[in-house]
Image (cartoon, rainbow, N blue to C red):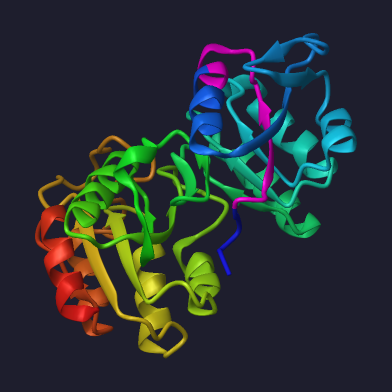
Amino acid sequence: MTVLVDRRTRVVVQGITGREGRFHTRLMLEYGTRVVAGVTPGKGGETVHGVPVYDTVEEAVKMHDAEASIVFVPAPAAADAVYEAIDAGLRLIVVITEHIPVQETMLFIDYARRKGTVIIGPNTPGIIAPGKTKIGIMPGDVFAPGHVAVLSRSGTLTYEVAAAMTREGIGQSIVIGVGGDPVVGLTLAEAMEMLEKDSETQALVLIGEIGGDMEERAARMIREGLFTKPVVAYIAGKTAPPGKRMGHAGAIISMGSGSYGEKVEALRAAGVQLAQTPYDIPKLLAKTL
């Protein structure tokens, strides 16, 4: 099985006529993603790279039986776009957009959960099943098919680690950027529940960062025996000063919690191998596999 997506997944691009939507639609098509439709209100009837554009997600889903969407809509209208996709019945929504207000994110994630829709992001590079499909903005050429899953809070580190793994002959079963905001849809622990059941995944790489408690919750899950596959982790932000935001909206140590030390200690206590740099990850994986 492949977690959440496979080569048959039919994708709608919301905001397809904008600069980013147009550019990444071309790259996703070149990778082999089944982009079946685009949506931009008022642009129905146009085409982008041969993909038909509709005024609403409902029309696009009705015409093409789509299952997933990727959102390139600017922040002021992004929440409305997500609600539209949920109400159209899509089961997976990848929200690339940055700077969506946290309260709006919390509300649409709660709505999505009640409707049975999985949201990846916001502020995510997306999801890729190497050699099968990508719904995101990651550079496809650094990934290779294999049996190690990667879950990450950082887009750029995801690419760096995947490239290092690929150079060492270690391919990836699935790679998910969960997003760098304080509140995201799919959490590390929820993704690990799926990966525990995934027959294609033999091991896991976790790329975390300071702020929040997703890594601590992942560690608790491992410690309690709810995730049993080998895990290698890297936590970014070792030298970050408390109270200072470091790049991502969620990467901030506040009220004395979410520090590098707490995350490393929790993961180490759960038996996870900790990499000192992203480039140590392939060496640790080679000892594990």
Q: Which residues are magenta?
A: 7-22
185 up-or-down from 74: above or below: below
Query: 169 or 230: nearer the eye?
Result: 169
Q: Residue 150, image x and y in percent?
A: 36, 59
Q: How many marks?
A: 0
Q: Residue 38, image x and y in percent?
A: 71, 24
- Residue at the far bottom: name it: 225
9 up-or-down from 274: above or below: above
- Quadrant of the rendered structure where residue 267 is? bottom left
> Where's the N terminus, which quadrant?
bottom right
**Residue 100 showing in the rendered view:** no
Residue 13 falls inside the magenta stretch: yes
Going 82% across and 11% down the picture, which residue do you hit?
45
Query: 85 or 253: nearer the eye?
Result: 85
> Where's the C terminus, which quadrant?
bottom left
**Residue 147 showing in the rendered view:** yes
**Left or right: residue 149 compared with residue 163:** right
**Left or right: residue 145 compared with residue 31:** left
Residue 235 falls inside the magenta stretch: no
Going 21% across and 80% down the picture, which residue do you hit?
288
- Quadrant of the rendered structure where residue 145 is? bottom left
